[in-house]
Structure formats: structure tokens, C-alpha cells
Image (cartoon, rainbow, N blue to C red):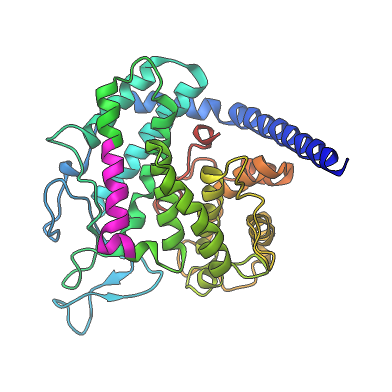
Amino acid sequence: MKKQLLIIMLFTLTINTAFAQNTYKSQATAILKAQVLKEAEWAMQQKPITVTASSSPHSTGGKHDFFSEGDYWWPNPANPNGPYVTRDGETNPDNFVAHRHAMIRFSEIIGALASAYKITGDEKYVKQAIVHLKAWFVNEETLMNPNLAYAQAVRNLYAGRSWGIIDSIHLMEVAQGIVVIEKSKSFDKASLTAIKKWFSDYILWLNTSKNGIAEKNAKNNHGTTWAMQVASFAKLVNDQPMLDSLKLRYKNVFLPNQMATDGSFPLELARTKPYGYAIFNLDAMVMLCQILSTPKDNLWTYQTADGKSIKKGLDYLYPYIADKSKWPLKPDVMFWENWPVAQPFLFFGANYFGQQTWFNTWKSLDLKPSNEEVIRNLPIRHPLIWL
């Protein structure tokens, strides 16, 4: 009898959750449809721009290698021609960012086209997306090599650093966009196979290179966002062993080691931009739940022995999103006034837990931010493709 009652309760919970998620999907589609179609109209007019379109004399990589420079590194006043020195949280505006901008633009294009296809079913969006996907991943003249060995370099010090791997969070919506459109009539098998091979090669590099391993083992948001990226890429190529290993990492590493029992992230709160970093890391944690959860292994409901869970993280940060004036720490040293925007954790948290208040806060915030720093730290800007 008890077993039958438990089955009924689980069935009822599943039905209620599915109903709530369909409700939020409908609400979000209604809110975002006009914006999506406008973005897609823009994307239909764009020609591909990949890493081969620009280069930096400071890069030690080749034409096809992604290159960027560490954000918080500056010339040393005591030795202007020597190694740069760090100023945590303070972005150097003179750094090379053209490849980062190109990747973000690529993400915007694929995210918009995949969203429009999901809403309308119009194959024209798929055909345009394929042009850009082939330019980045297939065409020998313009493709990007599947590594970030030269990302976030530091002049006269490092050719590239593990921290730079965070730059490719903007390939997540590219990967998810492909998931949305891959079964369309217009997506030829040869191109899809080549594109998926690129992502498989990148997953391999992320797990075997010196920089990839170092980023994987980072104790703060860098480790979380490494996993978030790999999860989205592994989902695309159906790498189940990798997906399973990431679930274990979420349970055994991220929740126990990054979250305090009150739901905060102490390592992020210790930075000079604690508000922005707390938001960023919670977004990443939530996306791991969104990407990796299955009915048999649901990260949304998982909690550690001492009660740490994604729900506790959401409950901790939400009041400071709803009313920023309640934030108990000092304001961030830069970009304090630019946060929050329509954060993914609000949307996907509301969608799973049925929290209309969180959803209302999400839709009341900036749904299409334009600040460069915000966009750089907001890899999920097209939520409809993730539902």
C-alpha cells in the first residue's frame, strides 16, 4: 500500500511539474517572440565572421587559433615593457577582444536563428545557420581550431592560460542551437557529422590538455563553467559517459566544495565583484541542472548530506536580485550598476520549481542587455532553445 501511494505521489508530482513547465514555456514564448523574430531578421542578413578575420601581433598561435588577453592584466608602471601585472576585477580596455566579439556574435546569430526556427518551423533559418556553422567548424579557410590554447594570454608572461577556457561559454548556445535544428530537412548529414566531430575534438582537448585539466579542477566559477560548457557539447554529440561524469562532479565537487550551507558561494563573495560573480556562478550551476538532469537522476532535487542544493542557492540569491539594495557586501568595483539582467537562473529555476515570482522578476529585468561586460558573462541569452 505504501509503495502504491509513493508511486501515485511521484506520478502526480511529474504531471504537475510538466504542466508548470509548459505554462512557463508558453509565457516565455509570448514575451520573447517579437524579440526573437527581430533578432532572426538581423541574423538572416549577416555574413560569417570567424577567428580568421582578425589577428593580434601578441598571439603566438596561428591564423585559425582563438586568441584573447586576460581581462584584469595591465602594464606595470615600474616596468612598462615588462610582464603585465594583475588588478583583480578591473578590465583593461586595450586588450585584444576581436575573437571574443566574433564568437559572441556567432552565438547571437545561431541562438536567434534556432529560436526563430523553433517558433515558426521555417527552414530558411536553418539554411542561414548552416552557412555560419560551416564557416566556423568545416570550411578549411575560415574554421577555428578546436582548442583555446591561446586564450586570455598575458603579455610578456603567458602565451595562454587555463582561465581563458571560460571564453568559449559562448559556444554553448551554438551547440544547443544545433540540437534544435539538426533534424530539419535542410541540415545535410555530411555537414552535421563534421560539426559534431569538431565538438568531440574540443571535448577531448578540454579533458586532456594542460590548460583544460587545470580549468576542470579550478575551485571557483571557472570549474563550474568548464563543466557547463562540456555538458552542452557532450549533449550535442551524445557523449553519455562524459555526461554521467559531469553529474557526479556536480554532486561530489561543486555543491559540497563551492556552496556554503546557507546557499552562498564563499569563493565568489571574496572577490572584488562579489555580486556579479555570485550571479554568474549560480547561472552556471542552474544550467548544469538544466542540461544534465534526467527523470532517473534529477540534479534539481539533489541535495548533499548537509542540505546543500540548487534550490538553496536560488533561495539565497533571489532576494538580492529582487531588491539589490539589500545586498550585504560592498558594491562591485566595476559594472555594479549593470547587474542584474534577465538571469538564466531566474528563468530555469522558475520553470522547474513553479515559482511565478521568480519568473515575474526575470521578465521585469533587461531581456536583451547591451553592455559588453554583461553579455560576456551571460552565455544563455536565448532560453527558448533550452526548453
Q: How many marks?
A: 0
- Front position in the image: 374 or 217: 217
Q: Quadrant of residue 38?
A: top left
Which residue shows up at 32% across the image and 38% down it? 106
Residue at the (36%, 43%) spot, across then down: 171
Left/right placement of residue 381 relative to residue 124 reads right
Q: Which residues are magenta?
A: 197-213
Q: Quadrant of residue 19?
A: top right
Q: Nearer the viewer, residue 253 or 164?
A: 253
260, 248: nearer the viewer:
248
Q: In this rendered view, identify the residue nearer to me: 263 or 95.
A: 263
| Residue placed furthest toward the bottom | 78
- Along the horizontal axis of the image, is 22 left or right of 95? right
* Magenta span includes 212: yes
* Magenta span dominant secondary structure: helix
Q: Position of residue 277 (x, y in %)?
A: 50, 63
The residue depicted at 88 percent of the width and 40 percent of the height is 1
Q: Position of residue 193 (x, y in %)?
A: 28, 29
> What percent of the width, then of the height, locates residue 113?
40, 27
Q: Is residue 37 magenta?
A: no
Horizontal placement of 281 versus 111: left or right?
right
For the question of whether residue 62 can be seen, the reply is yes
Quadrant position of the C terminus in the picture:
top right
Does the image show residue 46?
no
Image point 56% across, 30% down: which residue? 32
Q: Indicate whether 191 appears above or below 240.
A: above
